Image (spheres, rainbow, N blue to C red):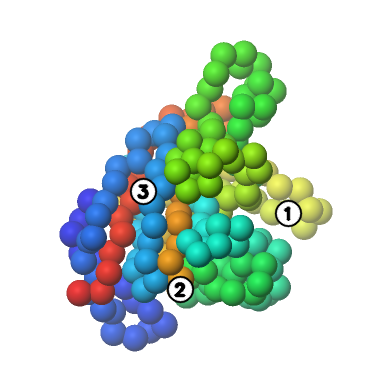
Amino acid sequence: MDEAISLDQNGKLPPCAQLVRGMVVAARTGWADTVRAGQFLKILDQHGKRAGDFRAFNAANLDERPSAMHRRVWVNRLCPRPCESYHTKPRRPILPSAPCDEHRYQLYGIQREHANCSCNFRRMMAPFLGDVRRIPQPISLFMNVGVFSDGRVETGGNPSKPGDCVVFKAWVDTVVALSACPQDFNPVADWYPSDLHAGIYEAA
């Protein structure tokens, strides 16, 4: 994990941000932590062609989390561009810029237990949420899902390159959870899942 990053915000001079703590999220596992308001979260695909399911919650109210439909109304596009925020149901920005589960692998014919993003989420978020019964919709990182004019969607090969990253700024204290996607039955993680790197930074 690098020790500093430069963050280009709205074309202004990029401030330097120093690493507070970092984590290697091993393939097929998950990680959760709290990012304080004003801090940055960097998720790095060091190897290329990796994928991750990401979730975020208002630390002061864990029922408040990013909402895809409210975010689409706010930014008027399917996916936000750099510096556009993810918004919660109360239309509050929380961060700028359908997980796999045990049932999906059963459809693939896998009868044994298979690592999956939903179980990773339950395990990582148990200290914050207790017994997790409802799995919220994730923000899918580094994934390539095409949306066609007839409404059809299709998972394509992962285009992420070594060193690609996503950087979020926390507008409020935010509990975050990341699963290094275990999917090895379609090209979402290039058929061979591996680790992702996560780092929490603050302005120097």
The image shows residue 134, relative to residue 15, as above or below, that is above
Whether residue 128 is visible, yes or no, is yes
Identify residue for label 2: 171
* Residue 24 located left or right of residue 71: left
* Residue 127 located left or right of residue 132: left
Q: Position of residue 174 (x, y in %)?
A: 45, 62
The image shows residue 108, relative to residue 16, as above or below, that is above
Q: Amino acid at mark 3?
A: Asp
- Nearest the viewer among 175 and 97 is 175
Q: Disc 2 on helix, strand or loop?
A: loop
Q: Which mark is residue 148?
A: 1
Mark 2 crowdedness (10 Å alpha carbons): few <14, some 14-19, many ≥20? some
Q: Position of residue 185 (x, y in %)?
A: 56, 27
Mark 3 crowdedness (10 Å alpha carbons): few <14, some 14-19, many ≥20? many
Q: Amino acid at mark 2?
A: Trp
- The quadrant of the image that shows the C terminus is bottom left
Identify residue for label 3: 45
- Marks 3 and 2, the one that precedes in the sequence: 3
Q: Disc 1 on helix, strand or loop?
A: loop
The image shows residue 106, relative to residue 54, as above or below, that is above
Q: Position of residue 138 (x, y in %)?
A: 58, 50
Q: Disc 3 on helix, strand or loop?
A: strand
Query: Residue at position x 62%, y 13% from top?
Result: 111
